[in-house]
């Protein structure tokens, strides 16, 4: 559990240290206005502002589909992902932000209980954990007259050790991902519709080209492929400091390698539905909780549930 404290709770302490500072404005006065409605993912930061997001997702499954859409039972598998994002505004027009993203993962297999993922064990049988990817990232608002449309582009670099005999930890891919955001507030500022369209490309060595005695072939299944998740969120604001939402996502994973050239040529898709809420704890810090259920899938897609907890500091 010491490893868990080191890797997961230290960033929370960092966020806590920011609260006292960011509760004051430039004159040292307390600020009361909430950021939940103002700073949606579509909205960029002003020059000199900072945005730190610490998001944790725990996905667990006991069912998956076969090559088609037939469901089968499997021993429980659990995948924990911590994603930390740090951005700052760099343009006077508030239309360009730059940042850095990194991910820590912990997976368990063979029927291990869900919360055992938090032990952060790493062995060659039923558990794997570690820092997996780092990424430079940029956010852009391309049109000055459309302030609620923006995109974020990141290039994820795998940094974890390649272990041939170990269970799956993460994709062994260089991953270029661009997310497009748009939101619309209506109903006397009580409702908001938020949409997201992602376009991602996985690059890397073909699975068939890897050395099975030295490389983890299972982590190369996604190389030379494209992923297209489409998401929509409908939010209601009971107050300026809180919101509840429902969401839906349809995602397509498309392998474009030529199978005759020993490419991966692997494709799958899924549909997920969920709900959640956010609350503004202070001017600096808000908390988010959510739940998602993978209600259908095709081609070895897991049919599990994701429980998420996020903290965001804006100052």
Image (tube, rainbow, N blue to C red):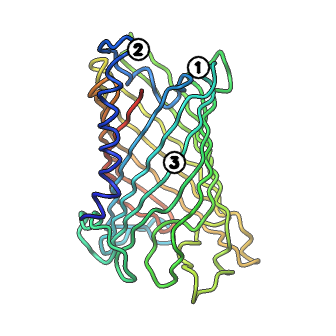
Q: Earlier in the sequence, mark 3 or mark 2?
A: 2
Q: Earlier in the sequence, mark 1 or mark 2?
A: 2
Residue at the front extreme, as displayed: 27
Percent across and percent down for residue 8 are 33, 54
Please tell me which residue lies in front, 62 or 136: 136
179 is higher (above) or lower (below) than 57: above
Residue located at (33% from left, 18% from top)? 24
Residue at the bottom extreme, as displayed: 213
> What residue sits right under mark 1 in the picture?
147
Percent across and percent down for residue 219 are 54, 72
Please tell me which residue lies in front, 242 or 157: 157
Name which quarter of the figure residue 109 lies in.
bottom left
Q: Are marks 3 and 2 in contact (CB under 8 Å)?
A: no
> What residue sits right under mark 2 in the picture?
26
Front tag of 1 and 2: 2
Quarter of the figure that contains the C terminus? top left
Residue 68 falls left or right of residue 286: right
300 is higher (above) or lower (below) than 291: below
Crowd band around label 3 with a 10 angstrom C-alpha radius: few (<14), some (14–19), many (20+): some
Please, what secondary structure does the residue beneath circle 1 have?
loop
Crowd band around label 1 with a 10 angstrom C-alpha radius: few (<14), some (14–19), many (20+): some
Gap in angstroms between the C-alphas marked 1 and 2: 25 Å
Please tell me which residue lies in front, 183 or 116: 116
Front tag of 1 and 3: 3
Gap in angstroms between the C-alphas marked 1 and 3: 24 Å
Residue 7 falls left or right of residue 152: left
Quarter of the figure that contains the N terminus? bottom left
Percent across and percent down for residue 83 are 43, 50
Please, what secondary structure does the residue beneath circle 3 have?
strand
Q: Residue 101, which numbered label? A: 3
Q: Earlier in the sequence, mark 1 or mark 3?
A: 3
């Amino acid at each position: 559990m010491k490893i868990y404290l080191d890797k997961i709770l230290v960033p929370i302490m960092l966020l806590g240290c920011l609260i006292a500072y960011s509760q004051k404005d430039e004159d040292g006065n307390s600020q009361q206005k909430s950021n939940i409605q103002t700073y949606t993912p579509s909205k960029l930061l002003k020059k000199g502002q900072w945005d730190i997001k610490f998001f944790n997702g725990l996905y667990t499954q006991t069912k998956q589909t076969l090559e088609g859409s037939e469901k089968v039972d499997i021993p429980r598998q659990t995948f924990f992902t911590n994603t930390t994002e740090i951005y700052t505004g760099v343009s006077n027009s508030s239309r360009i932000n730059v940042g850095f993203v990194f991910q820590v993962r912990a997976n368990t297999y063979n029927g291990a209980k869900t919360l055992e993922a938090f032990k952060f064990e790493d062995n060659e049988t039923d558990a794997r954990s570690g820092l997996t990817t780092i990424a430079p990232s940029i956010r852009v608002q391309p049109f000055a007259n459309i302030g609620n449309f923006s995109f974020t582009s990141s290039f994820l670099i795998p940094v974890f050790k390649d272990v041939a005999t170990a269970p799956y930890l993460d994709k062994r891919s260089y991953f270029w991902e661009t997310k497009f955001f748009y939101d619309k507030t209506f109903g006397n500022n009580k409702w908001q519709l938020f949409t997201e369209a992602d376009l991602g490309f996985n690059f890397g060595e073909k699975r068939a080209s890897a050395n099975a005695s030295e490389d983890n072939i299972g982590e190369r299944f996604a190389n030379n492929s494209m992923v297209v998740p489409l998401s929509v969120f409908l939010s209601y604001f009971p107050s300026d400091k809180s919101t509840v939402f429902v969401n839906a996502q349809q995602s397509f994973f498309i392998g474009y390698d030529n199978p005759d050239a020993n490419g991966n040529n692997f494709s799958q898709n899924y549909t997920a539905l969920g709900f959640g809420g956010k609350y503004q704890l202070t001017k600096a810090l808000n908390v988010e909780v959510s739940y998602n259920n993978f209600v259908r899938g095709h081609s070895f897609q897991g049919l599990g549930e994701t429980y998420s907890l996020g903290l965001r500091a804006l100052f």
